Image: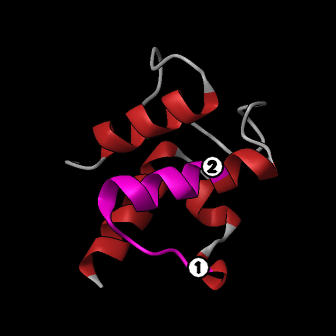
């Protein structure tokens, strides 16, 4: 999963958490206290900047933030558009 490491780095730096223990199966929304609604906006902005993608409000769903892997899959899908 080539984008997983970049998404992991963006998530950890945006939230100010370590990367230790983060894997594709790591639950995010509801499990990482730092990932509140304002942090989601920051993560999306960082992903847009890093990957050169545009994320519309309609694209944002909790299912994309279920795990680190689903967030990386979301980025991969946006890059394929």
Label 2 Cα crowd, 10 Å radius (few <14 / some 14-19 / many 20+): some
**Colouring scheme, one of rainbow, by chain, secondary structure, one colour:** secondary structure
**Residue 58 point in image, percent of width and height:** 65, 84
Label 1 Cα crowd, 10 Å radius (few <14 / some 14-19 / many 20+): few
Gap between marks 1 and 2 measured at Cα: 15 Å
Q: Residue furthest front?
A: 49
Q: Where 69 sits versus 54, above or below?
A: above
Q: Image quarter for residue 60?
A: bottom right
**Residue 73 point in image, percent of width and height:** 38, 61
Q: Is residue 73 left or right of residue 39?
A: left
Q: Image quarter for residue 5?
A: top left
- Pointer 1 residue: 59
Q: Where 3 sits versus 77, above or below?
A: above
**Residue 30 point in image, percent of width and height:** 78, 42
The question of residue 41 being in magenta is answered with no
Q: Which mark is residue 42?
A: 2
The residue sitting at 58% across, 79% down in the picture is 59
**Residue 35 point in image, percent of width and height:** 72, 40
The residue sitting at 45% across, 20% down in the picture is 19
Q: Where 34 sits versus 7, above or below?
A: above
Q: Which residues are magenta?
A: 42-56
Q: Nearer the viewer, residue 36 or 29?
A: 36
Magenta residues: mostly which secondary structure?
A: helix
Q: Where 33 sits versus 51, above or below?
A: above
The residue sitting at 30% across, 85% down in the picture is 81
The residue sitting at 66% across, 70% down in the picture is 61
């Amino acid at each position: 999963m080539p984008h997983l490491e970049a998404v992991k780095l963006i998530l950890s730096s945006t939230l100010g958490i370590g990367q230790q223990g983060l894997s594709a199966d790591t639950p995010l929304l509801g499990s990482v206290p730092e990932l509140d609604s304002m942090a989601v906006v920051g993560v999306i902005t960082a992903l847009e900047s890093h990957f050169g993608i545009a994320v519309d409000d309609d694209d944002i769903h909790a299912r994309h933030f279920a795990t680190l892997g689903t967030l990386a899959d979301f980025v991969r899908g946006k890059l394929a558009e």
